[in-house]
Image: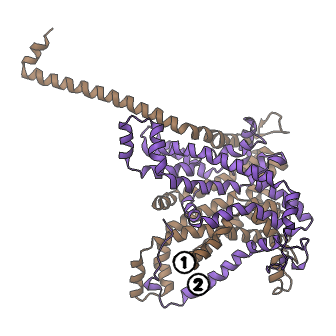
Chain colours: A brown, B purple
Amino acid sequence: MPSPAHVQSTPGAAVADIAVNDVRVRLRRGVRRKRRSAQRAVVALGLLLPSLAVLALFTYAPIVQVVWDSVHTRRAPGIGASFAGLANYQAILADAAFRNAAINNLIYAVGTVGPSLVIALGFALALARSTQVNNLLRAFFFMPVLIPLVAAASLFLFIFLPNVGLLDFYLGRFLSRPPNWLGDPDVALYSIMALTVWKNAGYYMLFFLAGLQAVPDEAYEAAYLEGATSWQRLWHITLPYLKPTTAFVAVIALINVVTQVDHVFVLTKGGPSDSTNLLLFYVYQQAVESYDIGKAAAGTLVSLAVLVAVTAVSLGTLENAFGGRT
Amino acid sequence: MFLGHRNTVPLALRREIAPRIGQALVRLAALVWLVPILWMLVASLRSQSFGGPGMASLIPDVAPTLRNFVDAWEAADFPRYYLNSVIIVAGILAVQLVTITLAGYAFARLAFPGKQALFYLFLLQLMLVPVVLIVPNLTMAARIGLYDTLAGVMAPYFASAFGTFLMRQTFAAIPRELEDAALVDGASVLQRIRHVYVPLALPAFLAFAIVSVTAHWNEFLWPLMVINSPDKRPLAVGLAAFTRGQEGAQAWGVIAAGTLLVVAPLLVLFVLFQRRFINSFVTSGIK
């Protein structure tokens, strides 16, 4: 065995020794780094644990549960479930009430998302400048956002009341025979849509107002010098700049269409003759009124599929729009 | 802040007719938007509370009365509903502030394997909002003994993907040097979060609090599912039952008064802190 002194005496060995040392140091550093990164992972996990525990209980486990429920049937609540394959899905697809709820929800989506967005954009364009009057008007439009949907429904119950209600009292004079706003199956869904637009337009307006702040003044000035009309400016400057905002607001509006049905409970309970039944209300009916957990689960998954599809398609836009804002 | 300060008329908008028509239309629309709220105020103070053709009039009566409020207060247990709503809202917010701070810090400042995947796992909650999962969540609440309890109403919201996202963005914008200084002093992770990050993130916490409180004060469907005993109902659920009862009696003035009792706290806060509310909701985007 060569002594250390002997090794150090030759230049080549000295180089080798330095290399060995270097490797040792690097190894030690590596170990330390690994230990530190393991430590960091433990710390991170500890910090995330409270949130993850809640998410596990009320987001992840319920997903598994709902998938499981959707392929099982129970003859009565509490009795052991048996595997049913796709029977629950077949059952809801064969259920006229479900098909009806899905179609209603589609009409409801088209009839609320489009108009709310157009109205919100109109409000934002008109109120873009921050003056005292405009701030007051913005506040007026925003107020319905803070009113619970149930409370709004309580108010609209009277607004839509035949003969003595607000609509008939003020508008009835202009109509020879005002419709029964909530009692006529052909009209009720549209009445509910009006409430939704009233409630949400002010919320969406905020995003358009924020979006308008990002349109550079220079673009308008240039268009003005080019002699563009106000419509041309709207089409060629304002709207293109607002594209990400619009996509973002549309996603929020679509999520609301699937997740907010509180007003149906107060105003119509899905009627008359199921004309205002929406998907989530159908799910509620199946679970709470018919105790049919299997059908409720299948209905939930169909709603979820719609939600996930809508959100997934727009996730990229959503991230961009949000990232740019904060 | 976002909503701003363009006080001069942009050159491009001067001497134009279209904007003026827009202004006129938007003022008209504002009136229409106010009608339900105005009616609520007027009708709640109106003496002839049982129907009648004048019930819809928006012109206040000469002799206002508080009779409707007295009737509403007696017809439903509003003090109890208020208490329940306050407990629920405060409980949810208190726990959320802790969970989103810890998770937000982890995502903003720590590097660890699987971070990206975990972050997406969090964001999943934005899509799978608890409302859609009412049925399986109810099973879960029953399984862990939270059925018909206020804790059951709160539990699904103890974690918030939106809040975590918001805190991640906020913490990431705070200079690292501040934390390094505390690190040199030997501060632990929790101490660093508590004394370096939290004090600098107060505006974000406030924005989150406004959105969270509004959302849960107004929530209806989930509490309706979880709560069975009438004395555990929060305001929104209580109001729905109350409205159903008074609708049969055609007591529209009483309904207006009851509704006003429910919406008043948030509307008053909004009038007082308008700008804060509006800025919070712009940040909210995703609830």
Q: Considering depth in this image, is B273 or A235 the residue closer to the camera? A: B273
What percent of the width, then of the height, locates residue A131?
A: 53, 78
**Residue shown at 66% from the left, 78% from the top:** B30
Residue A264 appears left or right of B49: left
What percent of the width, then of the height, locates residue B17?
A: 54, 90
Relative to A64, residue B45 above or below: below
Give how far apart the Cα atoms at labels 2 and 1 are.
Answer: 8 Å
- Type of the residue with mark 1: Leu
Residue A289 appears left or right of A219: right
Q: Considering depth in this image, is B264 or A193 the residue closer to the camera? A: B264
Numbered circle sitting on residue B22: 2
What percent of the width, then of the height, locates residue A201?
A: 64, 70
**Residue shown at 56% from the left, 77% from the top:** A132
Relative to A279, residue B156 above or below: above
For mark 2, give the secondary structure. Answer: helix
Pointer 1 chain: A
Q: Are marks 2 and 1 on the same chain?
A: no
| Residue behind mark 1 | A125
- Type of the residue with mark 2: Gly
- Tag 1: Cα neighbours inside 10 Å, few (<14), some, or many (≥20)? many
What percent of the width, then of the height, locates residue A244?
A: 50, 66
Give the image quarter of residue B236. Answer: bottom right
Q: Residue furthest top?
A: A1
- Tag 2: Cα neighbours inside 10 Å, few (<14), some, or many (≥20)? some
For mark 1, give the secondary structure. Answer: helix
**Residue shown at 34% from the left, 28% from the top:** A32
